[in-house]
Amino acid sequence: MTSLCELQTLVRCPDGAGSVEVALDQTSRIDTAKVFAIYGKGGIGKSTTSSNLSVAFARLGKRVLQIGCDPKHDSTFTLTKRLVPTVIDVLEEVNYHAEELRAEDFVFEGYNGVMCVEAGGPPAGTGCGGYVVGQTVKLLKTHHLLEDTDVVIFDVLGDVVCGGFAAPLQHAERAMIVTANDFDSIFAMNRIAAAIMAKSRNYGVRLGGVIANRSRATDEIDRFNAAIGLERMAHFPDLDEIRLSRLRKQTLFEMPPTPALAAVQAEYLRLAQALWAGVEPLSALPMKDRELFDFFGVE
């Protein structure tokens, strides 16, 4: 049986001292759709943001594919109402002979026609998540599933800067960062912005903007953005309806209507329209850790 480790190819890259990542197969580039990668601190609400943004794009008439890149494979469950088999699950079943897979083995239709894929991840402590993302894109291209797609959204694992973190940046046009209005979330955002800026030296990806989530106010986010050159593109407050949507396995567009929820839905639609129209790339200058501590007055 072929092992996951035997299938991975690691290369050193010139975008950072000791940088190691999975090599990009040039045949797996996505060039037929607008591609967005969603980043942010672990637990900040990236999957909620990604899933509802996918629905918003679909409401605009776009053909959408969402790719979950976290080993816990829960990116798309509000769309599909279940934890779908991951790419790694189905590859393991065929001893990693990808040619034996059918599209329906790893691509599942979710709410409002959004197509859903969960890349999954290697067993804890082994392998590299970057291989999984690369293999997922390669499978999608092999089965011609990207040719009929307008928008691809990568929902990326938390703020761990590794191969699994970096691999979607090889495919994305714009990277968006989800954050809350607190120090820990902004600290993670600063680190993520630095990583994206480093990768943009070699890849086509550029920073697209910031999405404020789970926050009543955005004053600290806005102050930080102004200091390093980022811009806030959307704001989603800390509503209980959003928390309940995950428990009910529903997107926000399926929840019982309330005035507050209608405003959130409208904000998602506005964000989708802005991203589809195109956002100018941002050139941020992230702070050093100590600078950030001083900026927020942390002793």
Image (spheres, rainbow, N blue to C red):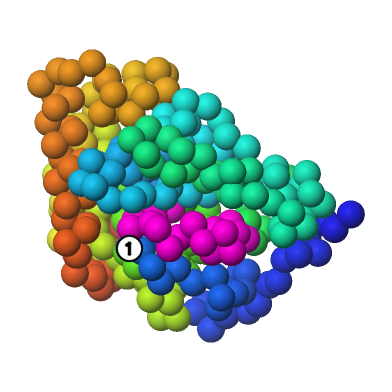
Callout 1 crowding tier (Cα within 10 Å): few <14, some 14–19, many ≥20 = some
Say if residue 186 shows up in the picture: no
What stretch of residues is rendered in magenta?
A: 133-154
Count numbered badges in the picture.
Answer: 1
Return the residue nearer the eye: 92 or 165.
92
Q: Is residue 278 above or below residue 56?
A: below
Residue 244 as seen in the image, left or right of residue 147: left
Instruction: Choose top left, top right, bottom left or bottom right for residue 184.
Output: top left
- Could you tell me which residue is drawn at 41 percent across and 50 percent down? 65
Report x, y in % for residue 73: 56, 39
Residue under the point 33% across and 58% down: 150
x and y, in percent, of residue 147 in the image: 43, 63
Q: Is residue 141 magenta?
A: yes
Residue shown at 38% from the left, 57% from the top: 149
Is residue 62 covered in magenta? Answer: no
* Residue farthest to the right, as pictured: 1
Q: Please tell me which residue is depicted at 18% across the width and 25% down the height of the picture.
A: 261
Image coordinates of residue 162 in percent, x first then y, are 57, 60
Question: In the orientation shown, which residue stands out farthest toward the bottom?
Answer: 14
Quadrant position of residue 174: bottom left
Residue carrying label 1: 34
Query: Could one spot residue 118 in this view of the protein?
Result: yes
Say what secondary structure mark 1 lies in: strand
Residue 207, image x, y percentages: 30, 65
**Looking at the image, residue 197 lies above or below residue 265:** below
The image shows residue 267, relative to residue 250, as above or below, that is below
Where does the N terminus fall, quadrant-wise?
A: bottom right
Which of the pair 241/299 is nearer the observer? 241
Mark 1 belongs to which amino acid? Lys
